[in-house]
Image: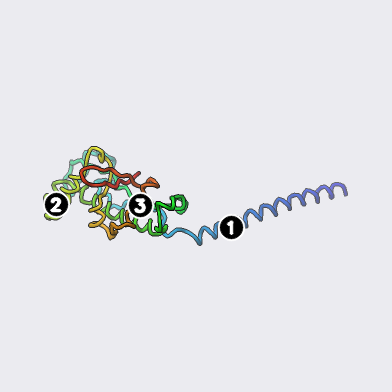
């Protein structure tokens, strides 16, 4: 009987532990349901480089520096023995998290809501991508392009300085011409928020402000 009483006592203790564990699991399930129902509209996505994108960026699946890399010319001919020049990928401005947005002082964000900031980031990234799809082309390709592309290329290059070496940036004119974002007071507020949160930095000089993507 003493052994049975001791066993019953142990099982009662185990039962109490299981009740505590059950409560913890239910709390976790509740939190997971809440998180699932309140996910932000935009979350950072890992971009997978497709075969075509790899070709445009000058990268292939073969080892870098191979002496027999194949280079396709405009007329479809393949030239063997040429070495491809690899270019770094164009970075994108990362979305703000809800917590980051909430920590921005009221006097900075004003009436700009969370979704508006991330919508603006979409447009800024669109401008960055469009600009560097031109800047990243070899000059030999640019020389065969339209006059408008040549003019854009020269303008982009003229805005580069020693401070912007290795940095991807856009200016007000790029935002106006390469995205649907209007450079009004709201857009200025968004840029201030992004600078405050470390998503972009500004480099001034030469009569323009360069909004640099922080990586």
Q: How crowded is mark 2: few (under 14 residues within 10 Å), some or many (20 or more)?
A: few
Contact check, label 3 and label 2, Cβ < 8 Å: no
Residue holding disc 2: 151
Q: How crowded is mark 1: few (under 14 residues within 10 Å), some or many (20 or more)?
A: few
**Res 29 label:** 1
Contact check, label 1 and label 3, Cβ < 8 Å: no
Q: Residue at the spot x=39%, y=47% of the render?
A: 196
Comes first in the chain, label 1 or label 3: 1
Assign a secondary structure to mark 1: helix
Decide if residue 64 is on the left or right side of residue 16: left
Contact check, label 2 and label 1, Cβ < 8 Å: no
Comes first in the chain, label 3 or label 2: 3
Which colour style is shown? rainbow
Quarter of the picture containing the C terminus is top left
Decide if residue 212 is on the left or right side of residue 80: right
Residue 188 image offset from top left, x and y in percent: 32, 53
Decide if residue 31 is on the left or right side of residue 84: right
Residue nearer the viewer, 188 or 128: 188
Decide if residue 7 is on the left or right side of residue 88: right
Distance of label 2 from label 1 (alpha carbons):
58 Å
Q: Residue at the spot x=62%, y=55% of the render?
A: 25
Residue holding disc 3: 47
Q: Residue at the spot x=32%, y=56% of the render?
A: 187
């Amino acid at each position: 009987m003493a052994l049975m009483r001791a066993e019953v006592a142990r099982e009662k203790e185990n039962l109490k532990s299981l009740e505590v564990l059950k409560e913890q699991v239910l709390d976790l399930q509740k939190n997971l349901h809440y998180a699932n129902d309140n996910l932000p509209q935009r979350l950072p996505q890992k971009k997978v480089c497709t075969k075509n994108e790899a070709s445009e960026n000058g990268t292939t699946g073969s080892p870098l520096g191979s002496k027999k890399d194949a280079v396709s010319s405009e007329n479809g001919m393949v030239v063997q023995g040429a070495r491809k020049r690899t270019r770094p990928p164009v970075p994108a401005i990362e979305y703000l998290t809800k917590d980051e947005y909430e920590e921005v002082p009221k006097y900075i964000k004003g009436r700009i809501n969370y979704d508006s900031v991330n919508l603006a980031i979409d447009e800024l990234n669109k401008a960055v991508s469009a600009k560097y799809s031109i800047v990243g082309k070899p000059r030999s390709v640019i020389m065969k392009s339209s006059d408008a592309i040549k003019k854009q290329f020269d303008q982009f290059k003229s805005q580069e300085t020693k401070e912007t070496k290795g940095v991807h940036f856009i200016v007000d004119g790029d935002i106006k011409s390469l995205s649907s974002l209007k450079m009004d007071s709201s857009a200025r507020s968004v840029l201030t928020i992004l600078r405050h949160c470390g998503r972009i930095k500004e480099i001034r000089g030469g009569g323009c402000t360069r909004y640099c993507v922080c990586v």
